Image: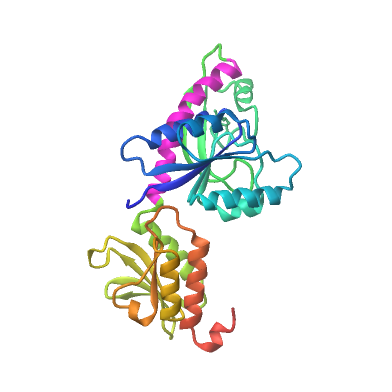
Amino acid sequence: MAEKARVGVLISGRGSNMTALLYASRQPDCPYEIVLVAANDPDALGLKVAAAEGIATFGLGHKGMKRADYDRILDEQLRGAGVQYIALAGHMRLLSAEFVGKWEGRMVNIHPSLLPLYKGLDTHARALEAGDTVGGCSVHLVTVELDSGPVLGQMEVAVLVDDTAETLAARVLIAEHQLYPRVLAELVTRDATPEALLGKLREIALALPAAEEKLSHGTPAFAVAGGKMFGYFSDDHHGNGITALLVKTSGPEEQAMLIEAEPDFYFRPAYLGPSGWIGLRLDQGGVDWDHVGEWLLKSWRMAAPRKLADVI
Ligand code: GRF
């Protein structure tokens, strides 16, 4: 991968999982880096650890603030730090549906049970109460419903006959520290393969009216049926090492302006560049698919016959 994925970690307390993610990120070849640690308690111990390790921190108490306002500020901080993925690690505050929606597919959480068992709190006491012989932990994608998103990885922990909720929690925590960095690394790596990027592009592009996929000089491309092309997938074109989506701009002026404003994201592609097409880099870590979707729609509008373009 060209760049390391930029991760923001949200905590509320001691932040031992954040610390595990951080030290794992300092191992050779780790595909992510921690760029911001934020807490809804300015005194959270984990913030002190992060600061001492030279990581940017943001602590803001949520008491007395409207959830939507708090989440807007948090979102600004995360985007300002260039965060591409969020890892929740003992973050004890519910996030608004709007916030969760914005980070869909790019926000993970660690939960101290073998989901779907024991969502919510007191997981270890409930596992012991039920007489379970194994406990454990899960990393899952965050969706609006608490502890219910797709599970990405789990680790089992044997229950000892004389375990208490505390002793079991302590062992599960060791397992959490092993599981979380690996699963996060897998997620950012998996998302960055050209196959995964193309799959996601297809999903968005082919949902547009009359959109169809074509091969253009051996490259997957998207066209409006009976109309023009509106997107090209470009993967290591002539060995340039770039994975990107090419879309149409309104012309050379817009193209130049965008490239100047965000040279790490936009570029002028060979061949199609002179006709006003622009490249959006998909190989820079977590991709903002909503943004890519807006570009595909804009490009689709330019390619679609008038009658069709007026429909949406
Ligand atoms: C962990 O047990 C985690 O599974 C749960 O909250 C706890 C956070 O601990 N979501 P820490 O702050 O990471 O030490």
Measured from the top left, where is residue 76 in percent x and y?
A: 59, 52
**Count of marks, rendered view:** 0
Quarter of the image for residue 147 reads top right
- What is the residue that sits farthest to the bottom in this orientation? 306
Q: Could you tell me if residue 267 is visible in this image?
A: yes
Horizontal and vertical percent position of residue 195: 35, 58
229 vs 298, left or right, is: left
Between 130 and 286, the one lying in front of the other is 286
- Identify whether 113 is placed above or below 167: below
In which of the image's four quarters is ligand 1 placed? Answer: top right
Q: Do we see residue 212 in this rendering?
A: no
Of 78 and 114, the residue lying toward us:
78
Is residue 185 within the magenta segment? yes
- The extreme left residue here reads 239
The answer to whether 115 appears left or right of 20 in the picture is: right
- Of the 4 image quadrants, the one containing the C terminus is bottom right
The outermost residue toward the top is: 162
Kindly report the secondary structure that dominates the magenta region of the rendered protein. helix
Applied colour scheme: rainbow
Give whichever of 57, 127 is nearer the camera: 57
- Please give left or right for residue 118 compared with residue 267 in the image: right
Tell me residue 80's x, y (percent): 53, 52
Magenta span of residues? 164-190
Residue 77 part of the magenta-drawn span: no
Q: Is residue 309 above or below residue 120?
A: below
Looking at the image, which residue is at 64% across and 52% down?
72
* Picture coordinates of residue 20, whole percent (x, y): 45, 31
